[in-house]
Image: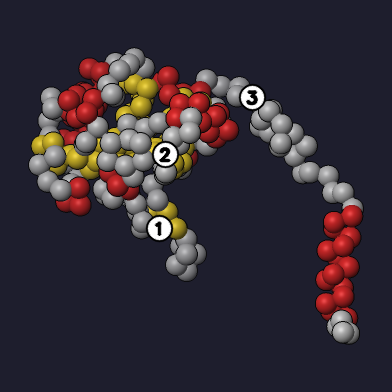
Amino acid sequence: MKVSSSKEKILKKIRKALTDQVPLPFAKSEGNESNFPPPVRELDILFAEEFTRLSGYFAYCLNSSDLMDQLNVLFKTRGWKNIYCVESGLKDFLKNAECALNKTALADCDASVTGCELLVARTGAVVMSSAQAGGRTVSAYAPVHICIAEVSQLVYDTRDALKYLKEKYGKNIPSFITFAAGPSRTADIEKTLVTGVHGPGEVYLFLIDKPTLQS
Protein backbone atom coordinates (compact mmCIF):
# COMPACT_ATOMS: atom_id res chain seq x y z
CA MET A 1 0.00 0.00 0.00
CA LYS A 2 1.35 3.38 -0.95
CA VAL A 3 1.97 5.74 1.92
CA SER A 4 1.18 9.41 1.39
CA SER A 5 4.07 11.87 1.55
CA SER A 6 2.64 13.68 4.61
CA LYS A 7 2.18 10.42 6.50
CA GLU A 8 5.70 9.31 5.58
CA LYS A 9 7.10 12.57 7.00
CA ILE A 10 5.32 11.93 10.29
CA LEU A 11 6.60 8.35 10.47
CA LYS A 12 10.16 9.53 9.80
CA LYS A 13 9.91 12.01 12.67
CA ILE A 14 8.66 9.27 14.99
CA ARG A 15 11.47 6.90 13.96
CA LYS A 16 14.03 9.65 14.47
CA ALA A 17 12.63 10.51 17.91
CA LEU A 18 12.81 6.86 18.96
CA THR A 19 16.42 6.41 17.82
CA ASP A 20 17.90 9.77 18.86
CA GLN A 21 18.36 10.35 22.57
CA VAL A 22 17.14 13.73 23.75
CA PRO A 23 18.56 15.05 27.03
CA LEU A 24 16.07 15.63 29.82
CA PRO A 25 15.31 19.33 30.49
CA PHE A 26 15.92 18.65 34.20
CA ALA A 27 18.74 16.17 34.53
CA LYS A 28 17.90 15.36 38.16
CA SER A 29 14.12 15.14 37.70
CA GLU A 30 14.10 11.36 38.17
CA GLY A 31 16.47 11.34 41.13
CA ASN A 32 16.13 12.12 44.79
CA GLU A 33 17.14 15.77 44.60
CA SER A 34 14.84 18.75 44.22
CA ASN A 35 14.96 20.85 41.04
CA PHE A 36 14.52 23.98 43.12
CA PRO A 37 17.19 25.70 45.20
CA PRO A 38 16.90 25.42 48.99
CA PRO A 39 14.93 28.17 50.74
CA VAL A 40 16.83 31.28 51.78
CA ARG A 41 14.09 32.44 54.16
CA GLU A 42 12.20 30.79 56.98
CA LEU A 43 9.35 28.64 55.72
CA ASP A 44 6.61 30.60 57.50
CA ILE A 45 7.80 33.87 55.95
CA LEU A 46 8.12 32.31 52.50
CA PHE A 47 4.65 30.77 52.74
CA ALA A 48 3.09 34.04 53.89
CA GLU A 49 4.61 35.91 50.95
CA GLU A 50 3.47 33.37 48.37
CA PHE A 51 0.02 32.87 49.91
CA THR A 52 -0.77 36.60 50.01
CA ARG A 53 0.60 37.03 46.49
CA LEU A 54 -2.14 34.60 45.41
CA SER A 55 -4.82 36.79 47.05
CA GLY A 56 -5.03 34.80 50.28
CA TYR A 57 -5.32 36.47 53.70
CA PHE A 58 -2.60 35.42 56.13
CA ALA A 59 -2.43 35.89 59.92
CA TYR A 60 0.23 34.69 62.35
CA CYS A 61 -0.92 33.66 65.84
CA LEU A 62 1.36 33.26 68.84
CA ASN A 63 -0.92 30.76 70.58
CA SER A 64 -4.53 29.54 70.80
CA SER A 65 -5.60 32.59 72.79
CA ASP A 66 -4.23 34.91 70.13
CA LEU A 67 -5.96 32.81 67.48
CA MET A 68 -9.32 33.13 69.24
CA ASP A 69 -8.94 36.90 69.55
CA GLN A 70 -8.12 37.28 65.86
CA LEU A 71 -10.99 35.04 64.77
CA ASN A 72 -13.47 36.98 66.87
CA VAL A 73 -12.27 40.26 65.37
CA LEU A 74 -12.68 38.80 61.88
CA PHE A 75 -16.18 37.46 62.58
CA LYS A 76 -17.29 40.77 64.08
CA THR A 77 -15.72 42.94 61.37
CA ARG A 78 -17.23 40.93 58.53
CA GLY A 79 -20.54 40.31 60.29
CA TRP A 80 -20.21 36.52 60.05
CA LYS A 81 -22.53 34.69 62.42
CA ASN A 82 -22.91 31.20 60.97
CA ILE A 83 -19.64 29.28 60.92
CA TYR A 84 -19.44 25.68 59.67
CA CYS A 85 -16.88 23.24 61.08
CA VAL A 86 -16.90 19.44 61.48
CA GLU A 87 -13.32 18.64 62.55
CA SER A 88 -13.59 17.68 66.21
CA GLY A 89 -10.54 19.50 67.59
CA LEU A 90 -11.36 22.75 65.81
CA LYS A 91 -15.06 22.38 66.54
CA ASP A 92 -14.40 22.15 70.28
CA PHE A 93 -12.12 25.18 70.09
CA LEU A 94 -14.70 27.27 68.21
CA LYS A 95 -17.39 26.66 70.83
CA ASN A 96 -15.89 29.62 72.68
CA ALA A 97 -15.89 31.87 69.63
CA GLU A 98 -18.37 34.69 69.08
CA CYS A 99 -20.36 32.91 66.37
CA ALA A 100 -23.14 30.41 65.84
CA LEU A 101 -21.34 27.16 65.11
CA ASN A 102 -23.05 24.73 62.71
CA LYS A 103 -26.44 26.37 63.16
CA THR A 104 -27.03 26.20 59.43
CA ALA A 105 -26.23 23.97 56.46
CA LEU A 106 -22.88 24.28 54.71
CA ALA A 107 -24.53 25.87 51.67
CA ASP A 108 -25.99 28.64 53.86
CA CYS A 109 -23.02 29.38 56.12
CA ASP A 110 -20.99 32.58 56.11
CA ALA A 111 -17.69 30.72 56.27
CA SER A 112 -16.23 27.29 56.90
CA VAL A 113 -13.28 26.44 59.13
CA THR A 114 -10.96 23.51 58.49
CA GLY A 115 -7.49 22.29 59.26
CA CYS A 116 -5.17 20.96 56.59
CA GLU A 117 -2.62 18.25 55.93
CA LEU A 118 0.32 20.54 55.17
CA LEU A 119 1.37 23.96 53.90
CA VAL A 120 3.76 24.22 50.93
CA ALA A 121 5.97 27.26 51.45
CA ARG A 122 7.42 27.54 47.94
CA THR A 123 4.02 27.76 46.23
CA GLY A 124 1.82 29.12 49.03
CA ALA A 125 -0.48 26.10 48.71
CA VAL A 126 -2.68 24.54 51.38
CA VAL A 127 -2.72 20.74 51.15
CA MET A 128 -6.01 19.07 52.06
CA SER A 129 -7.35 15.56 51.58
CA SER A 130 -10.51 13.48 51.75
CA ALA A 131 -9.14 11.90 54.94
CA GLN A 132 -10.10 15.06 56.82
CA ALA A 133 -13.53 15.20 58.43
CA GLY A 134 -16.01 16.53 55.90
CA GLY A 135 -13.80 15.62 52.96
CA ARG A 136 -13.41 18.18 50.21
CA THR A 137 -16.87 19.75 50.55
CA VAL A 138 -16.27 21.85 53.69
CA SER A 139 -13.46 23.86 52.11
CA ALA A 140 -14.82 23.94 48.56
CA TYR A 141 -18.52 24.80 48.91
CA ALA A 142 -18.48 27.60 51.48
CA PRO A 143 -18.22 31.21 50.22
CA VAL A 144 -15.26 31.78 52.55
CA HIS A 145 -12.70 29.20 53.65
CA ILE A 146 -10.78 29.71 56.90
CA CYS A 147 -7.91 27.30 57.39
CA ILE A 148 -6.11 26.90 60.71
CA ALA A 149 -2.64 25.35 60.59
CA GLU A 150 0.44 24.99 62.75
CA VAL A 151 4.05 25.92 62.03
CA SER A 152 4.98 22.24 62.28
CA GLN A 153 2.88 21.56 59.15
CA LEU A 154 5.11 23.65 56.88
CA VAL A 155 7.17 21.93 54.19
CA TYR A 156 9.27 23.56 51.49
CA ASP A 157 8.09 22.01 48.22
CA THR A 158 5.29 19.92 46.68
CA ARG A 159 7.69 16.99 46.50
CA ASP A 160 8.18 17.14 50.28
CA ALA A 161 4.40 17.18 50.79
CA LEU A 162 3.85 14.12 48.60
CA LYS A 163 6.63 12.25 50.38
CA TYR A 164 5.07 13.07 53.75
CA LEU A 165 1.60 11.93 52.67
CA LYS A 166 2.99 8.68 51.30
CA GLU A 167 4.78 7.97 54.58
CA LYS A 168 1.74 8.98 56.64
CA TYR A 169 -0.88 6.90 54.81
CA GLY A 170 1.17 4.13 53.23
CA LYS A 171 -1.10 2.03 51.04
CA ASN A 172 -4.20 3.91 52.23
CA ILE A 173 -3.56 7.14 50.32
CA PRO A 174 -6.69 9.37 50.39
CA SER A 175 -8.78 9.23 47.22
CA PHE A 176 -8.61 13.01 46.93
CA ILE A 177 -5.67 15.33 47.64
CA THR A 178 -5.76 19.00 46.70
CA PHE A 179 -3.17 21.76 46.64
CA ALA A 180 -5.26 24.93 47.02
CA ALA A 181 -3.37 28.14 46.36
CA GLY A 182 -5.64 31.03 47.33
CA PRO A 183 -9.25 31.55 46.26
CA SER A 184 -10.55 29.83 43.13
CA ARG A 185 -10.08 31.88 39.98
CA THR A 186 -10.57 31.63 36.23
CA ALA A 187 -9.90 33.78 33.18
CA ASP A 188 -11.96 31.69 30.75
CA ILE A 189 -14.53 34.42 30.19
CA GLU A 190 -13.13 37.16 27.93
CA LYS A 191 -9.70 36.71 29.58
CA THR A 192 -10.89 38.58 32.67
CA LEU A 193 -9.70 37.15 35.98
CA VAL A 194 -12.65 36.30 38.22
CA THR A 195 -12.40 34.77 41.71
CA GLY A 196 -14.84 32.53 43.54
CA VAL A 197 -16.36 30.94 40.45
CA HIS A 198 -15.98 27.27 41.43
CA GLY A 199 -14.96 27.51 45.07
CA PRO A 200 -14.53 29.98 47.93
CA GLY A 201 -14.17 33.63 46.95
CA GLU A 202 -11.93 34.31 49.95
CA VAL A 203 -9.38 32.14 51.75
CA TYR A 204 -7.90 32.92 55.18
CA LEU A 205 -4.94 31.12 56.71
CA PHE A 206 -4.27 31.41 60.44
CA LEU A 207 -0.85 30.00 61.28
CA ILE A 208 -0.46 29.18 64.95
CA ASP A 209 2.98 28.83 66.49
CA LYS A 210 2.13 26.39 69.25
CA PRO A 211 0.06 23.16 68.98
CA THR A 212 -2.46 21.79 69.11
CA LEU A 213 -6.05 22.36 68.11
CA GLN A 214 -6.70 19.58 65.64
CA SER A 215 -7.35 15.92 66.28
The residue singled out by tag 1 in the image is 194
Rendered location of residue 147, percent (x, y): 32, 34
Q: Locate the N terminus and report the quarter of the image it occupies.
A: bottom right
Give the mark nearer the N terminus: 2 vs 1. Answer: 2
For residue 72, say whether it is visible.
Answer: yes
Badge 3 marks a residue whose secondary structure is: loop
146 lies above or below 39: below
Could you tell me how far apart the alpha carbons at marks 2 and 1 are, in whole angstroms? 30 Å
Left or right, residue 149 beside residue 98: right
The residue to which callout 3 is attached is: 38
Residue sitting nearer the eye, 171 or 68:
171
Q: Residue at x 41, y 20 (%)?
A: 151
Residue at image point 84% right, 49% down: 22
Q: At 30% across and 47% down in the image, what residue appears?
A: 137
In front: mark 3 or mark 2? 2
Question: How far is mark 1 from mark 3, CA to CA?
Answer: 33 Å
Q: Residues within 10 Å of mark 1 (few under 14, many from 20)?
A: some
Mark 2 is on which residue type? Pro
Q: Name the foreground residue: 24 vs 209.
A: 24
Callout 2: helix, strand or loop? loop
Mark 1 or mark 3: which comes first in sequence? 3
Cβ atoms under marks 1 and 3 closer than 8 Å? no
Drawn side of residue 157 relative to residue 151, left or right: right
Label ID, residue 174: 2
> Is the Cβ of the residue at disc 3 closer than 8 Å to that at disc 2?
no
Crowdedness near tag 3: few (<14), some (14–19) or many (≥20) residues, C-alpha within 10 Å: few
